[in-house]
């Protein structure tokens, strides 16, 4: 039979105060606030399965797990911090940005940071998780760049990782991050970087940023302009002109061709840049002028301009913008080339103008090459007996490089004799046509403009040559800071 001791109260011998007291359904252990109770053993169980262990109102506890506080370290941190759970750090970034590497995530782990010198806005604190663990549910490091910032992070679980628990300036996916890249000639306009490529190169993205900062780029991509034809030659068409709206990188002014066109997303990779060369003008019988070459970046390709019609190849060629038609001495008007070929939306260029045919003693003029925003004008045999070349179509103007700049004008058409009237190049760099004798004007380099058409030689003498098209350009712009 098991022995039992049955009592209601156990009292101290010295003063007869209660050590254990049974009163109704309540049992009290202890004899006053100044008398601690020590329970010794390798394992102590309080309560029963399904029961509750409660602390009295106003009571405090120790040793039952973290309370949400940290032990602040009095050594001011001025270099990389290897964070220990349960510690808080005063961080002095006056000498440069500092990285804090968090420990492996364990539920309840805690760390805190305070901007010691109020310099986080100029030199940030970069908080990095352990390996692939998350911060605020995202995989990006946490960039703390607010002056005087103080924040505490607690590790919740693998789904959300470290959560900021006492600061309202942090996004659920991390702080703003910005695109970082190299390549081309780099200039700045306020908070925006501009990469200008005047020849082939690489746009190398080392950081793709995020939606809170920047992760898309605006662009202007112009192909090479085409050469003009010879012998009452049509003006060369401008290279295809394609641009975004500019609203994601400062809302600069763009042409109508950029209206509503989205910026391009980027990833941390290298993007080849192709800048198209200008096509040669016609310089010899039997050898037509040359189209401009394509330019491209990412998923966008602009098509080279179509050459101007000339001796032998008399019809203007299609392209980004079409070439002007030849002025035909046989009385047969020659059509200009089609623009926006192949078709894209918005259209990348316009058609070239038609050449005029000779009538009686009135000579002919050639059509102007198409430009980015306007068709080349038709040539005419009136009112001047030497023929009138059609002006090239106008280009487009963009401020992507912080300066309003017109580009991609069509080349002007040539006239027949020295008494004729030449077609002027379209606004944006198109080359002027010429009249016999001479060589037509070239399209301006890195504008993608068409070359002018050559004049006639009256059936004798050297060929009046067409002008070369201008090379293209690729310009990329994005936000790199706030």
Image: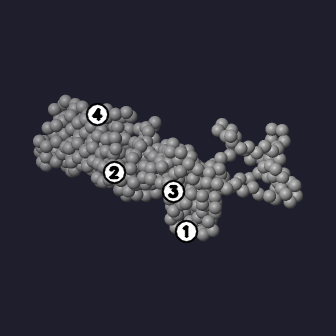
Q: Nearer the viewer, mark 3 or mark 4?
A: 3
- Secondary element at image label 2: strand
Q: Nearer the viewer, mark 4 or mark 1?
A: 1
Identify the residue under disc 4: 342
- The numbered dot on residue 103 is 3
Would residue 153 appear left or right of 4 to someone viewing this image?
Answer: left
Please report whichever mark, 4 or 1, sits nearer to the chain's N-terminal start.
1
- Secondary element at image label 3: loop
Please report whichever mark, 2 or 1, sits nearer to the chain's N-terminal start.
1
Disc 3 to disc 4, C-alpha distance: 56 Å
- Secondary element at image label 1: loop
Please report whichever mark, 3 or 4, sits nearer to the chain's N-terminal start.
3
Q: Are marks 3 and 4 in contact (CB under 8 Å)?
A: no
The residue that appears at 61% across and 61% down in the rendered structure is 88
- The numbered dot on residue 78 is 1
Disc 3 to disc 2, C-alpha distance: 33 Å
The residue that appears at 83% across and 47% down in the rendered structure is 9
Q: Nearer the viewer, residue 87 or 383?
A: 87
Identify the residue under disc 2: 270
Would residue 361 appear left or right of 341 to someone viewing this image?
Answer: left
Disc 1 to disc 3, C-alpha distance: 19 Å
The residue that appears at 43% across and 49% down in the rendered structure is 208
Q: Quadrant of residue 198?
A: bottom left
The answer to whether one can see residue 384 in this image is: no
Q: Quadrant of residue 305?
A: top left
Please report whichever mark, 1 or 3, sits nearer to the chain's N-terminal start.
1
Disc 4 to disc 1, C-alpha distance: 59 Å
């Amino acid at each position: 039979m098991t022995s039992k001791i049955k009592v209601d109260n156990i009292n101290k011998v010295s003063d007869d105060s209660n050590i254990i007291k049974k009163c109704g359904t309540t049992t009290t252990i202890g004899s006053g606030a100044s008398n601690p109770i020590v329970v010794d053993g390798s394992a102590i169980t309080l309560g029963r399965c399904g029961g509750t262990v409660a602390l009295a109102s106003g009571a405090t506890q120790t040793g039952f797990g973290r309370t949400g506080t940290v032990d602040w370290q009095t050594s001011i941190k001025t270099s990389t911090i290897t964070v220990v759970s349960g510690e808080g750090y005063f961080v002095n970034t006056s000498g440069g940005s500092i990285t804090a590497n968090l420990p492996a995530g364990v539920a309840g782990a805690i760390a805190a940071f305070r901007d010691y010198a109020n310099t986080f806005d100029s030199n940030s604190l970069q908080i990095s998780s352990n390996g692939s663990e998350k911060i605020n549910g995202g995989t990006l490091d946490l960039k703390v760049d607010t002056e005087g910032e103080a924040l505490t992070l607690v590790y919740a679980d693998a789904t959300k990782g470290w959560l900021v628990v006492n600061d309202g300036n942090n996004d659920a996916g991390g702080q703003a991050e910005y695109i970082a890249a190299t390549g081309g000639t780099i200039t700045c306009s306020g908070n925006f970087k501009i990469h200008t490529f005047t020849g082939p190169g690489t746009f190398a993205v080392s950081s793709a940023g995020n939606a809170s900062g920047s992760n898309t780029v605006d662009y202007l991509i112009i192909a090479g302009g085409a050469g003009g034809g010879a012998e009452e030659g049509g003006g060369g068409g401008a290279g295809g002109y394609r641009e975004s709206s500019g609203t994601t990188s400062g809302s600069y002014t763009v042409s109508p061709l950029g209206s509503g066109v989205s910026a391009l997303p980027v990833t941390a990779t290298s993007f080849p840049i192709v800048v198209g060369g200008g096509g040669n003008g016609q310089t010899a019988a039997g050898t037509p002028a040359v189209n401009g070459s394509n330019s491209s970046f990412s998923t966008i390709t602009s098509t080279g301009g179509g050459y101007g019609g000339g001796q032998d190849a008399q019809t203007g060629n299609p392209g980004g913008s079409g070439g002007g038609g030849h002025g035909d001495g046989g009385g047969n008007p020659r059509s200009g080339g089609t623009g926006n070929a192949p078709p894209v939306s918005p259209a990348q260029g316009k058609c070239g103008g038609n050449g005029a045919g000779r009538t009686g003693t009135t000579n002919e003029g050639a059509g102007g090459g198409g430009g980015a925003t306007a068709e080349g004008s038709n040539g005419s045999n009136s009112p001047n007996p030497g023929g009138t070349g059609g002006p090239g179509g106008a280009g487009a103007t963009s401020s992507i490089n912080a300066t309003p700049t017109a580009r991609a004008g069509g080349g002007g058409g040539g006239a027949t004799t020295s008494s004729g009237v030449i077609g002027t190049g379209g606004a944006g760099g198109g080359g002027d046509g010429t009249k016999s004798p001479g060589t037509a004007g070239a399209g301006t380099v890195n504008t993608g403009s068409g070359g002018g058409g050559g004049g006639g030689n009256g059936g004798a003498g050297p060929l009046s040559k067409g002008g070369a098209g201008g090379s293209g350009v690729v310009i990329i712009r994005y936000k790199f800071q706030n």
